[in-house]
Amino acid sequence: MLTSVQRTVIEADPINYPFGNTRSRNVLQDFNYELGGLNPSCSSLKVLFLGSGDLRNILQVSRNKSLKGMQIHANDRNPSVVARNITILKIISASDFNPEDDEDIAFLWDVWYNLEWPEVSRNRFQGVLKDLLNGVFPENVSVPKTSQSEMLKKVWGSWLSVLSKTESEARVLMEKVGLERKQCICKNCFPINPEKMENANIFDDFFSAVIDVLASYLERSIGLEGLNDSERQNIREEAKRYFEKGSCRLENDIKIVCLNPTLLDHATLRWIVNCFLCPFYGYLPLLKEELVTSIKSKMMIRSCQKILKNLLSCYRKRLIDGKTFELFFYLEDALEFCYSENVKKFDVIDCSNAADHVGLVNLILACSGKLSDHPSAMLITETMTWFDFGMGSVQLYLEKALCCPLSMIPTIYGLRLKSRIELGLPELVDLRCPTPPPVEVCWQKALPFHNVVMSASPALSEFLKQLANVCFDAKFPLRITHPSESDCGMLLYTPQTFSYVVNSMIQRLGGDHWLKKDVRPAEMQPNFQLARRTLDAWKEGQKILKFSAKIPSSSFNKFLHCAAVSGGPTLRFIIFPKAKHGNCSDFFGPDVHFIDNFEVKLEKSSTGFQDVSISFLLIPNHGLKKTHRAIIVDIHHGSEVVVFKSFESVQVEDWSVPYPFVPSKIQPEVPFHEEFHMKVYSCVESEDQFRLKIKITSPINVSDIKVLRIHRAPCESCHEITLSLMQQEYFKPLSLSFPYPIIIGNIRATLHRKGRYVDLVLKKALWEPWPCECRPADNLHNVLDPDQLKPWKEEESLQPSLKTHFRSQFNIRHLENNSLMEESSLNFIRFVIIDLFMDLSRFVTIQRMNAPTPDWFFLVHRPFSTTPTGKPFLLLSAFDSRLAEKLTADGKWSQKKTGENLKRVFPGGVEAFNIPIQTTEDSQLLRFVLRLNRSKIIPSKWQKKNLTLGEDSPWMATFVSPLYSDNPHLDVESSDASN
Ligand SMILES: C[S@@+](CC[C@H](N)C(=O)[O-])C[C@H]1O[C@@H](n2cnc3c(N)ncnc32)[C@H](O)[C@@H]1O
């Protein structure tokens, strides 16, 4: 009931992911525990995996060697996924398990991935299940909630019963599931005429053709260039063998005796695994050193098992070394988990691709309240369905899903985007890969406003309008109103989403002065009035009632059957006058109430759903008791089921769970002196600036104002400024902070002596690293050391060529037809990067058209190198001549120093290659990229010795690497067509 997500009945059309479909990664990779003073030898780091899926990401965390204590909390709503994870942990934690032992790894691989099992696996697994049913877990694993561990026991019990079947029963089940699997693959991958499914010969041919395509998809996703045709053919055949039977193993001629019960739906023993799923996807794209080429057969199994063994060894090493690694499992909805009381805060929260299932706004609202105060604490979200929704742009995906431009996110959601998605993707996307890559987005808490009272503004009004339009969307059925629109989870935004967003803002901004009452026309949609009144009363702490009604399971099953035509049903609960007829057109108009937030409980059995009940919240004086009845509709299809014919049949109880976003007590500082003080009167935020009016209360005339910027060079942005008036003896300085940093060199403060106010305009640092990105060198974490990087070797066969890296900065179609290429600054900088790599000059200048002197002088350090993730890396010693001018004007640098330095680094008589730059934007963006990259490396030995580096120096050690396109090879139209 606490979740703000609209109810979908995933149980009606479940797609199971017993194992993952994306490569795992260490979510602690970028976590800098030293930054917050976390002592790795005694503190315990807390990591939460929401919608964890399989264990691989969890095991990756054990790679961190320095942290002594770690608590891993893993949530998933699928009982089989949680039961499998605990089972696999039980297997790999046994003292006699050895990842390098062939039998052990074959058994584990069977459990993790294979549908068909030999006797040895069955017997060994039975022993594991008996232990789990007796509560014998690995020492470091627990399930804190009893009701959830009972549910898990049911799952283990069901698995044991599958393994205990007689030979003939097992054969019947194998045949049934084998056929279901084939049908499921055929039906879900490519629509087939149902009649053809009946004809065995046609069906077999069709199945064979489908798995050919699936195998070819997999081969194209492998991520390695330079494989020859026969190697690619081998990979396709290996994948096809997996798709054929649902199993892949190194051993040949194995006698199959039973099915892997962990891959079946535990309640119905049906096959409901996603049709594209293949074990190999969880390890792709492969790095070149991961592909085992020594033996040409079964290269994929060998390569994936090698990666898995390495991961298992890290985990076991951590256990053996006595470093704690406690694991807690939760079997429930991710958002209900985040909003439930007594849940701790976490230093890192990884959400897998839950945003695609629950909507990004719903997800980040629930998670941001659970992020710890550690300065490096981060939230990681991922999306696999961004491409069509964002029309091939990650930025557009985020701006659409969050209903605001990137630069408004800190104010609206209290988060900062750590991933610099405006500069493209961080890694190369293999051009052969047939699908857009999953995109990971990392978030951190933004700093709060201090002493700033936010005002209403066109930017905030526009945001509220857009959000209201999606949260209060009354139109349905969608098959008629919005046919086949991709929504990335936004369909599941509800009135509760709107209420949570607004109230989380009120909590953070210390009030609702910014909330104009007339900016939400869509919200005034009359069908949602009762839902709004109920949410408002709940927020105010007034009495709320929880109503529960049973729905006859036969009619509910019939309803779901109709609704399932359109995929997973999405439900809307409607309360409407008894007198109304009850067909679709009657569900609108006054006195009809839409409730999109409610809970449905159902128990799944082999014959359908049982014990179906619905609960919802209402204010006590709803006034509908005698006059209204209720139905549930599926908003896609429009089908409906009666919930109750009269309120009399409904159970009522008090609802006393507190509203999650209570207003905070944040108050601006109390004036030091009643008679003499400054106070922010208004702050209007727009996409690129804050404009403040500051009132001065003073009985005497004020003469001048000074603005102090609190920043640390070389960073040119800051979050805090302090205003002081010349009459310091009377006025306490006014300090202000902003969640989005501002440019220190562009602050305009105008004192209006007569009106006694200050007009302050602060430009947002849109193209300048944030203060937290310019950490002092001793706090650098996870940075590259250019002296340690391997040189680039173009001839290495499996590595993508330099040309591929450069081309991947653009959409290939646009490269082929230049007129399609967007004339953006980002594209211009991408060409500059290619020039820097390709021209052989050691000395390069960058000069704006008609400017008397270059903006930049570069010493280019060739030959270039390879980053650990395989990107080309070109080290630069860069002299920023505009900054030199500023520093010279401030007395921190001198012309003489410039001359001496330039002479030393660029000895006379050498021709420099000049790259001309056209616009100020191009120049600003290039500067941003160079300054951002500076924070990702330490200077090389040569640079430390030969450059005058430091806070007040125009020199920097930096680099360039390609800025990869979000969309190098697909265009939205062709992807639409293929979908
Ligand atoms: C598609 S899988 C993640 C796969 C991931 N890409 C990987 O390779 O590991 C998503 C997982 O999230 C879980 N899930 C989806 N929605 C959830 C929710 N609202 N609450 C909890 N778990 C959820 C599913 O049960 C599934 O195990």
Image (tube, rainbow, N blue to C red):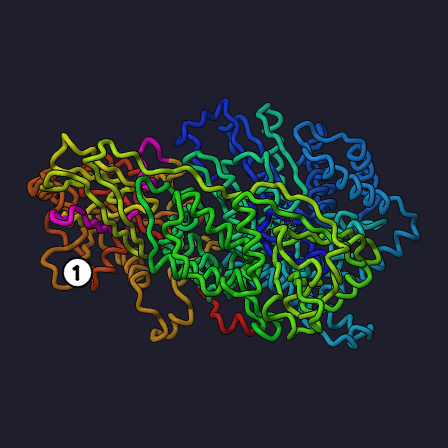
In the drawing, does residue 255 fall left or right of residue 505?
Answer: right
User: Relative to residue 700, is residue 508 drawn left or right?
Assistant: right
Residue 348 horizontal/vertical position (percent) = 50, 39
| Residue at the (68%, 36%) spot, across then down | 89
Give 856 or 230, whichever is nearer the viewer. 856
Q: Report if the beta carbon of the residue with label 1 is closer than 8 angstroms to ligand 1.
A: no
x and y percent of residue 357 in the render?
59, 56
Q: Nearer the viewer, residue 828 or 402?
A: 402
Number of numbered markers? 1
* Residue 816 on the magenta span: no
Q: Where is residue 135? Give x, y as percent.
A: 77, 31
User: Does residue 777 show up magenta in the picture?
Assistant: yes
Few, some or many residues within 10 Å of mark 1 (<14, 14–19, 20+): some
Q: Residue at x 28, y 51 (%)?
A: 690
On the question of residue 82 being in view, the answer is yes
Q: Residue at x 49, y 63 (%)?
A: 524
Q: Compared with residue 602, is residue 317 higher up or lower down, i.e. above or below? A: above
On the rendered structure, is 779 left or right of 723? right
Mark 1 element type: strand
Q: State which quadrant residue 6 falls in.
A: bottom right
The residue under label 1 is 848
Residue 777 lies in what quarter of the image?
Answer: top left
Which residues fall within the magenta stretch? 752-780
Q: Is residue 979 visible in this depiction of the protein?
A: no
Choose between 475 and 811: the one closer to the eye.
475
Q: Tag 1: residue type? A: Arg
Whole-percent x and y of residue 453?
Answer: 32, 46
Quadrant hosting residue 423: bottom left
Instruction: Please tell me whether residue 529 is drawn above or below residue 892 in the rendered image.
Output: below
Quadrant for the C terminus, please.
bottom right
